[in-house]
Amino acid sequence: MNAANPVILERALSRPPKEADLPLRGDSVGNDRYTCAEYLKCEYHKVWHTVWNIGGVAYQMPEPGDYLTTELGIDSIIMVRQEDGSVKAFFNSCPHRGTRITEAEDGHVKEFSCPYHGWTFDRTGVVTSVPDEEDFAESPCGKARLKEMPCEERFGLIWYNFDPDASSLDDSLGETICRELESHRIEDMLRVLDMTAETRSNWKIITDNFNEAYHVKVLHPELIPYVAADYEDCQFDCFPNGHNRGWFPSFMPSVQYGSDVIGEPLKSMAAAWNVNSDDYVGRDTWQQLRVDIQAAKRESGEAQGYVHYSYRADYQLTDYVIYNLFPNNVITVGPDGVQLLRPRPHPTDPSQCLFDHWWLVNRVEGQAMTPSPAGGPDLPVADAPHEHIQYGEKTLGTTADQDLSIAEMQQKGLASAGYQGYWMPNQERRVQAFHEHLNDLMRD
Ligand code: FES
Ligand SMILES: [Fe+2]
């Protein structure tokens, strides 16, 4: 972001502008993509080696020499802050004989040192010393280096791409997605939840789940009273390069809500902004309730410490928008923070993946605790340590738990000899678009 000229969307926007529908071919979706180890291996090279992925949160590595590591499939990636403030990313594989040079998740170094034979590397990845240098026909010092990959700091996050010839992240995402993500100023947020769960499903079962909202009224009934997730109320847009966006008007019930009277939790959510939800009886009034809460937030939010409301468009004061950035970066933005819900592929087993759940929040003056996204216990407003768990050991948040609970069942059903392909309604066209883009990459 250009700090002098931050993106502010048009204030009066009541929803994200609708994109023209991209044509779909109607490809069938075979189950080998979920179950076949050979497909996973091929996918690793044809998909994961060509896309941008999120490696970490930028504020965690402010100083030159600070580094973070992340894992993607069989690979570990090291991201290092440079003297000039930029970030470089390297494959974590020693140019001597391939050992990972660190297993730490983060740290600070003047030089890296490989634990096997002691080669050292400066922050730019170049070998600076080796034991017994005179014994080499040609010294590796100043010549050998960690293999570098494209790396960008954007939206407060560190992104990497295995493809040395990758086009820029902005080119991949396109102007609309970049503008909207930038408008949230994620770089000013604090990550208060950072969990990784080992999960027994293919990674795409989880992205499929986030690429549709058809399941919400069945799997997440607790959202019905305050998120209008029914397809007739929402807007779904597909973008080039496999990305998509879903918009969910919130602070109003969904059409499945079974009463004319607003109940909890929306009643309290409205009351927090001095809006009496008892004044809104019947579904004809629900849109007005949402709009009136937007107005109340606009009027008094900043004074109550919600400084970020000063640069939100109207819809951003109440609604949830999910950006599914191909292949697996699911970024859900809400009025007071951003979630990353991200499956990462298992190195070899197509029926497993890692599931990351991050929750980054805007700081609100005087607020020491913040609501967990969708149902978990309140969280301290402080940088969260990384927790690595087996799915089921503890909650990942109510809705994430619900989504993952179905993932293992779907993995088993998809592997069945009785699997017949997908039969999807129009509202699941983002699932279809995802698989058609995947097919394009796998074919090349
Ligand atoms: S493998 Fe790294 S120094 Fe030998
Ligand atoms: Fe869900």
Image: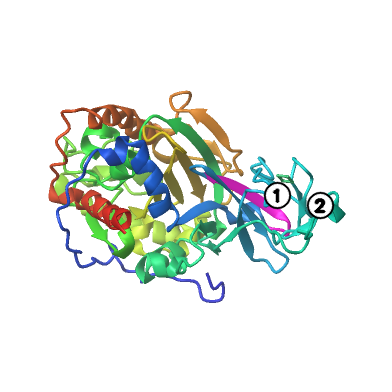
Q: Amino acid at mark 1?
A: His
Q: How is the image coloured?
A: rainbow
Whether the magenta-drawn stretch holds residue 228 is answered as: no
Q: The C terminus lies in which quarter of the figure?
A: bottom left
Q: Is mark 1 within 8 Å of ligand 1?
A: yes
Q: Are marks 1 and 2 in contact (CB under 8 Å)?
A: yes
166 or 45, which lies in front?
45
Q: Which residue is mark 2?
A: 130
- Quadrant for ligand 1? top right
Q: Residue furthest front?
A: 137
Q: Residue furthest top?
A: 393
* Residue 374 image offset from top left, x and y in percent: 39, 38
x 24%, y 66%: residue: 19
Query: Who comes first in sequence, dot 1 or dot 2?
Result: 1
Q: Which residue is mark 1?
A: 96
Vertically, is 417 above or below 193?
Answer: above
Whether the magenta-drawn stretch holds residue 68 is answered as: yes
111 or 118, which lies in front?
118
Disc 2 element: loop
